Amino acid sequence: MADFCNHCVERVFPGEKPDIDVYAIFKELKPGYLQQVLCEGCGMFAIVKTEDKELKVIYANETKSNLEVNNGGNLELRLKLVDYV
Ligand SMILES: [Zn+2]
């Protein structure tokens, strides 16, 4: 079962409800907190409620290959905090 966020579900199944409702998750978050989710369309990202109660998302780009990580390296993620638009 594939899970899609609000944007991706519109692209793949227009009119369907998202499995990952970013806005609903945002509403439940306390300011200064984030929740990590895994969307089939955009991959792993985090929904952020800033201290100012703004909705942001963090997308992560892996900077090491899975092979390196499996060989004992730490997974390094390059983070980008952006608006969910
Ligand atoms: Zn998505």
Image: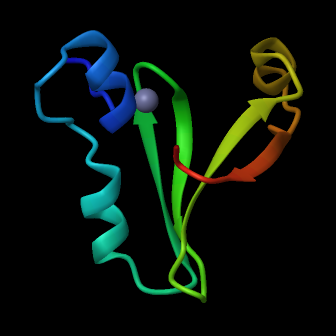
Using residue 2 as the reference point, say whether residue 49 is left or right of it: right
Residue positioned 85% across, 40% down in the render: 76
Q: Quadrant of ligand 1?
A: top left
Q: Is residue 8 left or right of residue 80?
A: left
Q: Residue furthest left?
A: 16
Q: Nearer the viewer, residue 23 or 33?
A: 23
Seen at 26% across and 19% down, the residue is 2
Return the x and y of residue 81 as percentages of the image width and height: 73, 55
Q: Decide: is 14 above or below 62.
A: above
Q: Is residue 53 above or below residue 27?
A: below
Q: How many marks?
A: 0
Instruction: Pick the residue in front: 28 or 38.
Output: 28
Work out which quarter of the rendered image holds the N terminus and state it. Answer: top left
* Image coordinates for residue 40, horizontal then vertical, percent: 40, 20
Camera-side residue of 47 and 6: 6
Q: Quadrant of residue 54?
A: bottom right
Q: Residue at x 77, y 31 (%)?
A: 61
Q: Position of residue 26 (x, y in %)?
A: 37, 67
Residue 71 position (above or below residue 60):
above
Residue 18: give x, y in percent of width and height: 20, 35
Which colour scheme appears in the figure?
A: rainbow
Q: Residue at x 83, y 16 (%)?
A: 65
